[in-house]
Amino acid sequence: MSEKIQKVEVVGTSETCLTFTIHGEGHTLGNALRYAIVKNPDVEFCGYSIPHPSDDIVNIRVQTLKNVRAVDAFRKGLRDLAEMTDAIREEFVCVNDNAMSL
């Protein structure tokens, strides 16, 4: 499996409240990443939006408690989501040789 490098832009003036724009993605990553980020007890708010249905851009807004940087919560969410997908991949392996490999 090849890794795809994504372009991520960060917008905001506060270290505890930032918007991350991920290019080349949509609802699948947006909702899963929002879920992973919001499970962090240091996160007060996390939401995502797609600016326009024909755009492959996801905006993820992260607001954290005063002592936690939003960029750190975003990175933790990415790591947590990667761990979740690895666990799912290990649990549900294809046993049919003709099946699509994960």
Image (tube, helix red, strand yellow):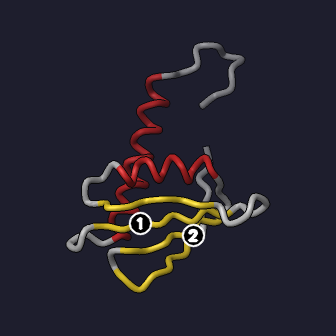
Q: What residue is shown with label 2?
A: 21
Q: Nearer the viewer, residue 99 or 44?
A: 44
Q: Residue at x 47, y 66 (%)?
A: 61
Callout 1 amino acid: Val
Q: Residue 75 appears in which quarter of the rendering?
A: bottom left
Q: Position of residue 31 (x, y in %)?
A: 53, 49
Q: Give the position of the C terminus as an image quadrant.
A: top right
Q: Nearer the viewer, residue 40 or 23?
A: 40
Q: Position of residue 19 (x, y in %)?
A: 49, 72
Query: With 9 as the anchor, is 77 left or right in this view?
Result: left
Q: Give the position of the N terminus as an image quadrant.
A: top right
Q: Residue 71 appears in which quarter of the rendering?
A: bottom left
Q: Position of residue 82 (x, y in %)?
A: 44, 46
Local SS, label 2: strand
Query: With 54 as the anchor, is 34 left or right in this view?
Result: left
Query: With 42 as the anchor, is 47 left or right in this view?
Result: right
Q: Are marks 2 and 1 in contact (CB under 8 Å)?
A: no
Q: What residue is shown with label 1?
A: 62
Local SS, label 1: strand
Callout 2 amino acid: Thr
